[in-house]
Image (cartoon, rainbow, N blue to C red):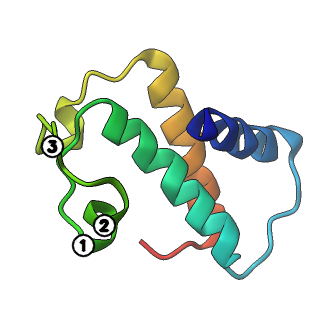
Amino acid sequence: MRSFCLSLLATALLASGMAVPALANPQACADLWTARNEIYKAQGYCFRTKRAIAAFGNAGCQYDDVEDLPLSANDHRVIADIVRQERALRCPR
């Protein structure tokens, strides 16, 4: 449920045309990162970074490449919206 809410937040921010601050907002960046990676986790992604493994673990993971994940069209749209928002906020990658 949290990932759905965060995804909706990211989509709403983009759709509203809200002015985006020039510098990264650490909490917004963290929320967007979490929302994006919750989608990946739900589809069986095997995380590589220490941060993601600590947050989500790799138990039950099946896919080493994000491109191989069985994402729905909606998942793709939500992830694209999140990535656009991360770029607009200049979130660290």
* Residue labelled with disc 2: 54
Look at the numbered discs 2 and 1 and tell me whether their residues touch, using CB distance below 8 Å. yes
Q: CA distance from mark 3 to mark 2?
A: 19 Å
The image shows residue 53 at horizontal and vertical percentages of 26, 62
Residue, x 60% and y 73% (percent of image)?
A: 90
Indicate the quadrant where residue 24 lies. Answer: bottom right
- Residue lying at 57% horizontally and 47% vertically, measured from the top left: 82
Label located before the other in sequence (3 or 1): 1
Question: Tag 3: Cα neighbours inside 10 Å, few (<14), some, or many (≥20)?
Answer: few
The tag on residue 50 is 1
Residue 59 screen position, x and y as percent:
17, 44
Label 3 sits on residue = 65
User: Where does the image place residue 5, in percent across and percent down from the top left?
Assistant: 69, 37
Q: Amino acid at mark 2?
A: Ala
SS type, badge 3: loop
Closer to viewer: mark 3 or mark 2: 2
Is residue 2 shown left or right of residue 43? right
